[in-house]
Image (spheres, grey):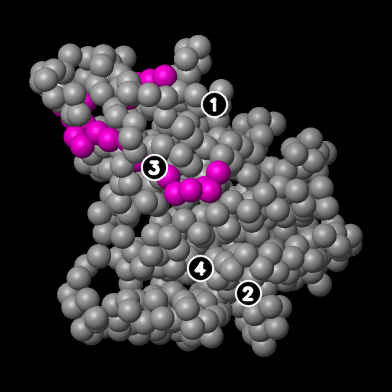
Amino acid sequence: MTSLMNKFKVITMSTLAVTAELAFAAHPPSIIGKDGWLFTRYEVFDASASSDTNESIALISKMNKVFKDNDIQMLMVLVPLKMRIYSEYLGTNKNLLSPFMEQNYQKALTSFSSQQISFIDLNKAFLSSPDKNGPTPSFLKYDTHWSPSGALLAAQTIKTGIDANPVVKNVFDKTKLEVYSLVKNPSLVKTIGITEDLATKDLLPAGYPPPPTEELLGFSVKKTNAKSGLLGSSDAPEIILLGSSYSKEWAKFPDALRFTLQRDPMVISVTADKGSWNGMLTMLQDNTFQSQRPKMVIWEMPERDLRLLPGYVFRDARYKMSNQEWLLRASALAQKSCKQSNVKATVTGGVVNPDPANQASFTSKETKNSDYVEISFSKNPNKTNYLSFDSKGSYLIRAENYSPNKEANPMKFELTNASNTIKIPLYSQTGSLAKIRIYPGQTSGFSMQNIQVCNQPEGII
């Protein structure tokens, strides 16, 4: 059972809710609907998810404010439940669509609106699409993801939503224009590269035959040329699409967005084991974001993931953290400049520093996994402080924040480049912090420059 659950966490959009986890053995994840349609049991939830959903929206609201304060426009996009959009194909399983599930999307949008979060309503667009039951439905029959037609509908709805929102459109119009053309396939073709994750034998009820490969009306998108934008020939990504596996290239959503927006967004999509919250940290930590900050972030999140908080009990331990830690990490990484604190950081221990006279930096020819750099502070930092430094040489940095009674709060930073700006909240679950140790892992050379303590915005916690 454990190995099967782990497999499903990788190939689907969401991990298990507590009630689904307990019922896993008795109820396979794939639900057999009418006319061969397949649905995922992990879309099923009820009013017990209300509290966690509200907490998620509160975190999104705070992150939205952080972005605004740092001159970045966030646009929230929730992928609606396949089970709601195609409820007519649930057949005898129609009772699984709870009243809470029916109302959840609209309640989330109402909350977004009241908290001034710009959002796109895909639920309404998918339910009312005249092509909903055409040759290619908006969702795949044997998969949790949307079809190419659904991806294109989502992208078109986003463009319409941007045009209808003066604040968002003002930012969008300042981004660089590109020219893309779209060619639709003239006939149905078999899916290529689509997971058909609900059709996996292990996830279907015992004895149920795997369905045939689905045939779709697809499309291709080609960049024809670039027009001069307001920023000339700048290659900096001015729009970032942060998403789940719905935003993978094979799902066709990035291409659909390129065509409808006539822009070239940087695409960051994460797998289900990381989840949307860690996806945000991945984007913020990326060297491109830190060095060439975008004007707009489009955050695509499956609606069903709203109830899975950063500390979700069944999330992989590597990616699990408290709501407060997530917010402090995300907010620190989003800051465009350091507001220097009166707390001073000093390199005081660990591997030998070739330049002990310079305690605001560190350089070593090589490091082992057990090596660390210890940093102490002129006085106890508070929860709105974070440590900032430029690192070179490591792709995985582990930090341990130590309280006065030597309890450690570990954090990991997975890096895509050997040179990065690292921002670590000086956060301890016990409330105070005495020192921090930085473990760069095994490297052929590691350095830390511009070590300083910065202030988070007031009221972030």
Among numbered discs 3 and 2, the one appearing first in the sequence: 2
| Residue 199 location, quadrant | bottom right
The residue at which mark 3 appears reads as: 455
Residue type at mark 2 is Asp
Q: Which-is-in-front pick, marks 3 and 4?
A: 3
The residue at which mark 4 appears reads as: 75
Q: CA distance from mark 3 to mark 2?
A: 36 Å
> Magenta residues, as a range?
434-461
Q: Callout 4: helix, strand or loop?
A: strand
Among numbered discs 2 and 1, the one appearing first in the sequence: 2
Q: Callout 3: helix, strand or loop?
A: strand
Q: CA distance from mark 3 to mark 1?
A: 16 Å
Look at 41% across and 37% down and name the residue there.
Answer: 385
Residue at far top of view? 405
Expressed as whole percent of the image width and height from the top left, the position of residue 142 reads: 65, 61
**205 relative to 259 in the view: left or right:** right
Q: Which-is-in-front pick, marks 2 and 1?
A: 1
Look at the image and tell me in which quarter the N terminus lies: top right
The residue at which mark 1 appears reads as: 431
Q: CA distance from mark 3 to mark 4?
A: 26 Å
Q: Is residue 457 magenta?
A: yes
Q: Callout 1: helix, strand or loop?
A: loop
Among numbered discs 2 and 4, the one appearing first in the sequence: 4
Among numbered discs 4 and 1, the one appearing first in the sequence: 4
Look at the image and tell me in which quarter the C terminus lies: top right
How packed mark 2 is, by other alpha carbons closer than 10 Å (few <14, some 14-19, many 20 or more), is some
The dot on residue 133 is none
Q: Could you tell me if the residues under marks 3 and 2 are in contact, i.e. CB atoms within 8 Å?
A: no
Expressed as whole percent of the image width and height from the top left, the position of residue 459 reads: 53, 48
The residue at which mark 2 appears reads as: 121
